[in-house]
Amino acid sequence: MPGALPPRAPGQPAGSPASARPLERGAPRPALAAWAPRPPADGAPVPRCRARDETRREEERHVRALARIVALACVEAELGLRPARQLSAWLDLPTYGKMVRRADLAGRTRPDRGAAGAPQALGARCCAAAEGVYEASATVRLPDRVRAVALRIERRRERWKVTALELG
């Protein structure tokens, strides 16, 4: 009969291959090959790389959010809608000094404080420049125009600080 199974040996359970033998009592079990994950197909990331990539994406999301918040706060400080001293938590000392001076000069030339309207952050982008260093850009909409802000954000003592800032 074509396709028929080979005959079973006496005492062999049904469904097992004909070459399999039942283990005798007290006989050592055959050694099994050590299990290892199958190597990924070409182009598939290794799990450690995926974890590192996910950490990097999370870090970039955090930096983008920080860039958007700081850009909006700096424009508000320059317009006189926010005290410049509130920027000290985000900016390093030289950048903070530059921003305070800029807000002070803008306040002297602008007689109508707060008349410009509330600015709105439109979005931000970031790019890793080095380990723990990002360069970011953000856009802020005012009632009469849109402003661009460029930032350099560095990790210092487990905190992100803006180390360079340019308002356009």
Image (cartoon, rainbow, N blue to C red):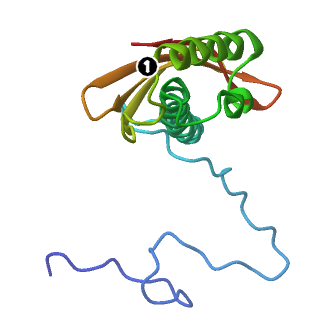
Front position in the image: 89 or 63: 89
Question: Residue lying farthest left?
Answer: 2
In the rendered image, residue 51, in percent from the top left (x then y), is placed at 58, 42
Which residue lies at the image location 75% right of the left edge and 80% below the top edge?
Answer: 24
Which residue lies at the image location 64% right of the left edge and 11% below the top edge?
Answer: 101
The residue beneath circle 1 is 149
Front position in the image: 66 or 108: 108
Q: Residue 141 appears in which quarter of the rendering?
A: top left
Q: Quadrant of the C terminus?
A: top left
In the rendered image, residue 79, in percent from the top left (x then y), is placed at 48, 27
In the rendered image, residue 130, in percent from the top left (x then y), is placed at 60, 12
Q: Residue 25 appears in which quarter of the rendering?
A: bottom right
Q: Quadrant of the N terminus?
A: bottom left
Which residue lies at the image location 32% right of the left edge and 32% below the top edge?
Answer: 142
Mark 1 neighbour class, 10 Å CA radius: few under 14, some 14 to 19, many 20 or more: many
Question: Is residue 163 shown left or right of residue 167?
Answer: right
Which element type, helix, strand or loop, lies under badge 1? strand
Circle 1: residue type? Val
Above or below, 118 against 111 in this view is below
